[in-house]
Image: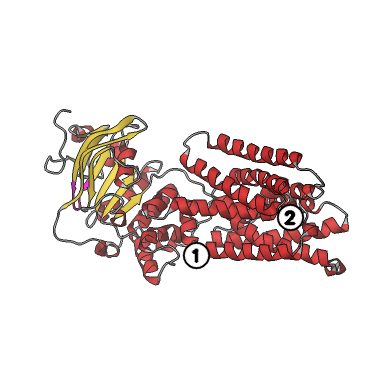
Amino acid sequence: MLEVWQLEFMQNALAAGVLVSIACGIVGTLVTVNRIVFISGGIVHAAYGGIGLGYFFRFDPVWGAIGFSVVAGLVMGAVQRKTRQRADTIIGVIWAIGMAVGIILIDLTEGYKGDLMSYLFGSILTVPRRELLLLLVLDACTLLIVTLLYKELLAISFDETFATVRNVPVDAIYMLLMCAIAVTVVMLMQIVGLIMVVALLTIPAAIAELFVKDIKWMMFLASLFGIVFNTAGLWLSYSFNLTSGATIILVAGAAYLLALAAKPLVSNHWP
Amino acid sequence: MNLAAVEPMTDSGNLGEVLAIRNLWAKYDREYILQDVNLSVQERDYIGIVGPNGGGKTTLLKVLLGLLSPSKGEVSILGRGPKQARQYVGYVPQAVEFDRAFPISVWDVVRQGRLGKRRLFQPYTPQDDEIVARSLQSVNLLEMRHSPLGELSGGQRQRVYIARALATEPQILLLDEPTANIDPEMTDQVGSILQELNQFITIVMISHDLGSISSLAKNLVYLNRRLLPYHYASQLRQEPTRGKGEVLPLKYCQFTSNI
């Protein structure tokens, strides 16, 4: 079993899984407690427009995806906050337009588009070293933002009106959260693919929420679960020659069902 | 109840005007929800604003909290505009059902009362924690500080929100339907806490439930788009056991003459 991890691409994949799980646990917790899973889904699907842009204009599609998803996140965040009605409809429309733009731009792009599927279904086994550095920077930024703005993030997540009355810049912090979600989901997209990002963003946090009653512990536990699911899924996918992204999601999904079943047996929360 | 815990939060001595509303008009979309509202609240007064749903109670509260700008008129809290006065105002929201799964402890909720005292990026200080502990003690919930909020009863949660408002070291408390959705025993507990706090803090409370508010407030006003003195309050109350419930004297509350 251990010799699997001596292969360089598996080491990279393991490192990518660990690094992305940290950002995912932190941001996923905020997504879960703020009940904005739908927006996260919208952001990652809109990111496909950026991938198309990257293909069409011949630059790294990841940067296109980041740019597109940040803009989509800011627009969706503003819609969610300012539109009293039909926010979900507008978010759904942006979600669909983003994907449609991506598909059309890729249609118009000439030449080989071999790695396109990796954005849809993930490619953790081909993550290059330079991308690990990018993931490390993402983790550092996420940790820094959450550490510095923890009291404000907790306040707006729990009671936005009260936070406003206490003069917290709620709009600015909410938009910062949208940007953090946008960057995290694009990074996550490369691991498990666009289609399954939302699952890996929310399942570890949803399991943690069952057992802890403190956001800091929830972030820690969600990150830990993410690392376990990524590692176990990676090993299983290698051992049984399965698609890695889908295997990781199935491991996470099975763990969620087990956690739901185990919850009634655990009477007290921890810590 | 430890009154010493809240006593230093406001200056004692001179009684003066804490809240002044003059010719206030406010609207949502194109409809005026508040029409020519006038009110003057003195220090350590305990005003109950009663009225039907849709009568503008929540709109008035939003204006007082600086969440909604008035179309016309003037609002002054301790001589300042609503946004500038926020640091002197404690806000207690409605006791509605909330997400019980939200992972937060009683302590972390009450700590949020200190938000306005700390800048961005600045962590809470030991002094903040001392005030949070005193606020929790004021509502007899210090022992439950580590409990998850979701495990508390409706009445206990409402006391947590009162403690959070007290942690802001307010000179005026604004309460939105504080006894809605909680059982009668807890309503009495919340009422007792508020009456004791009123020895040091001015209270403005809104409710659609005349029964609960009339036994708590010293003075009642009726808001249904326009503000009126509650002439019939004392007749409607059957047994005003605790509250004084007088109709608001005109020296405290000036109304438009054409209503």
> Label 1 is found on which chain of the structure?
A
Q: Which mark sits nearer the N-terminus, 2 or 1?
A: 1
Q: Position of residue B131 (x, y in %)?
A: 35, 65
Q: Nearer the viewer, residue B53 or A150?
A: A150
Asked whether A270 falls inside the magenta stretch, the response is: no
Q: Is residue A174 left or right of residue A92?
A: left
Crowding at mark 2 (Cα within 10 Å: few <14, some 14-19, many 20+): many
The residue indicated by pointer 1 is: A148
Q: Is residue B44 magenta?
A: yes
| A181 or B125, nearer to the observer | A181
Disc 2 and disc 1 on one polypeptide chain: yes
Q: Disc 2 marks which amino acid?
A: Ile
Q: Which residues are magenta?
A: B41-46
In the rendered image, the vertical position of residue A17 relative to residue A112, given as above or below:
below
> Considering the numbered disc 2 on the image, is that residue within a helix, a strand or a loop?
helix
Furthest residue toward left = B251
From the viewer's perspective, tell me whether residue B171 is left or right of residue B181: left
Residue bearing mark 2:
A191
Real-space Cα separation, disc 2 to disc 1, in angstroms: 28 Å
Badge 2 vs badge 1, beta-carbon distance below 8 Å: no
Q: Residue furthest bottom?
A: B126
Question: Quick one: quadrant of the C terminus of chain B?
Answer: top left
Dot 1 falls on a residue whose secondary structure is helix
